[in-house]
Amino acid sequence: MRRLSLGLALVILVLSLAGWLGDRFWVGELSSSIRPQLLIAAILVGVVALVLRAGVGAVLIAIAIAANVFVLASLYGGTDTRPVGLDRLVIAHVNMQHRGLDQAELAQVLNERKPDLLFLLDPPREWVRKHRAFSGYGVFGDGSPKVAAVVLAVQRPSLVGRPFVEGLPGSALVVETTIENQPLWILGLHTQSPMTPHKLWKRNRTLRIAGLLAAQPAGARIVLGDLNATPWSDALKQLERVAGLKNSMEGRGVQSSWPALLGPFGVAIDQFLASDEIVVLKRQTGPTFGSTHRSVWVTVALAQSQ
């Protein structure tokens, strides 16, 4: 048992340290994506090592725990909630993966929560083609026959369209609206899952291009969607730096969204990033509408001038 605990401790430590190489090492990126799970596993193995008095294993697992706590701690703590005015926007998004849409659940949630904008990324195409409106909401997209992304809104936003930028997926959708009579620019998208080295490269390229695109508009900006990257991913942090965005999970802790059946033990790959002009008042995960992803719901307001 001591040898087993030592072996497990070594594996967990290697995976935990490899997470810092995610920007250049495929296995490191995968390891980085499961830091909460590695932390839980490290704590369990650490308890076993202490019970067995396996000194070396306990030391290795302590290092692994410290490494993961160091990374995850940045998402916990206070949040700056200093809005101006009374205007609030409830914005939600979910990656439908072209799966069947649970219309009864969607109608119920729209009637109860009344979001201002609900992004459906990779929705079932036949459903979108049959619905220009649903439960009092208009269904707006770029008019493409492939129907890679739509937004549900009571009134049509001032602009809805696909940004035809090389490197962005078909699911990319730009929406322009207002908050406190100020323009608000939103980019929703679903990136490539980094399940192979080549797919990791494609995802990173998409995030780089999304960051450059989001850096261009003046004023309040938001990037949201299934970015297939966790808040501590190097590629996602680069997007945030380039575009001047903050992750809405900061100060609220890890909010896992996929796969939905794992609940809080899943992976936090569905993101909502906002510029300094926007203050996030509330963030939570919600219903799946038939997807394997939980939806993400965020309430925002215009921030006080810095």
Image (cartoon, rainbow, N blue to C red):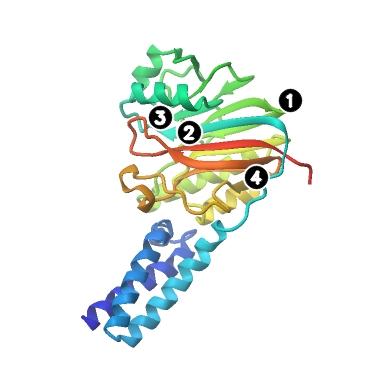
Q: Is residue 20 above or below residue 254?
A: below
Residue drawn at the location 30% of the way across and 85% of the way down: 54
In the image, taking residue 222 as reference, residue 255 lies left or right, namely left
Q: Are marks 2 and 4 in contact (CB under 8 Å)?
A: no
Q: CA distance from mark 2 to mark 4?
A: 20 Å
Q: Nearer the viewer, residue 148 or 140?
A: 140
Residue linked to disc 2? 93
N-term mark: 4 or 3: 3
Residue linked to disc 4? 243
Q: Is residue 239 above or below residue 34?
A: above
Q: Secondary structure at mark 2?
A: strand
N-term mark: 2 or 1: 2
Amino acid type at image mark 3: Asp
The picture quadrant where one finds residue 259 is: top left
Coordinates of residue 67 in the picture (x, y in percent): 47, 70
Q: CA distance from mark 2 to mark 1?
A: 23 Å
Q: Secondary structure at mark 4?
A: helix
Coordinates of residue 104 in the picture (x, y in percent): 34, 22
Residue linked to disc 1? 181
